[in-house]
Image (cartoon, rainbow, N blue to C red):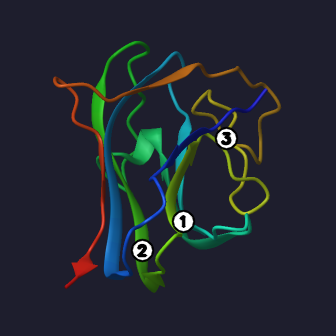
Amino acid sequence: MISALIYSTPPLGHDLEVTGPVRLEFFASSSAVDTDFTAKLVDVSPDGPAFNLTEGILRGKYRDSQETPTPLAPGKTYALAVDLWATSNVFRTGHRIRLEVSSSNFPRFDRNLNTGESAATSARYVTAINTIFHDAAHPSALVLPIIP
């Protein structure tokens, strides 16, 4: 089962421009030696439609280096970041800003077996139980470039 965390602001009281790089800085742990963390920035209209603006992914074993994979220590809490790339959007009055965090965004991004093994050569997989922390000791945050 894949679940997602969804965070939404209350309806905005004024137009809000977001232009530039978007980043999710967060604290997480996993029961697996590798897993994915995905994030989406979404504009939600007052009448219901939600529009994906930008998204990103972090594969746990590449958290420190794209060249040298390092397994996660199951149960250990890590400070991590997902680059959602750049966007430019005016969230209109009455709209909501939504952040969706998950461990998969298939088929947009390929699957993760959560074992650290290659998905091309291995069929073995494990279920990852991931925890996102957001408290005083773990100040996870969505960093938005707000334009005055």
Q: Amino acid at mark 3?
A: Asn
Q: Which residue is mark 3?
A: 112
Q: Position of residue 72 (x, y in %)?
A: 41, 26
Q: Is residue 58 above or below residue 51?
A: above
Left or right for 119, reference 141:
right
Q: Earlier in the sequence, mark 2 or mark 3?
A: 2
- C-beta proximity under 8 Å, tags 2 and 3: no
Check the picture and name the quadrant holding the N terminus: top right
Q: Amino acid at mark 2?
A: Trp
Left or right for 74, reference 101:
left
Q: Position of residue 37 (x, y in %)?
A: 52, 43
Compute the Cα span from label 1 to label 2.
Answer: 7 Å
Q: Residue at point 83% right, 31% down?
A: 123
SS at mark 2 in the image: strand
Camera-nearest residue between 134 and 28: 134
Camera-nearest label, 2 or 3: 2
Q: Which residue is mark 2?
A: 85
What count of labels does the image hold?
A: 3
Check the picture and name the quadrant holding the C terminus: bottom left
- C-beta proximity under 8 Å, tags 1 and 2: yes
Categorize mark 3 by other alpha carbons within 10 Å: few (<14), some (14-19), many (20+): many
Q: Is residue 76 above or below residue 22?
A: above
Q: Amino acid at mark 1?
A: Glu
Where residue 55 is drawn, which disc sits there? Answer: 1
Q: Position of residue 75 (x, y in %)?
A: 40, 12
Camera-nearest residue between 53 and 65: 53
Q: Earlier in the sequence, mark 1 or mark 3?
A: 1
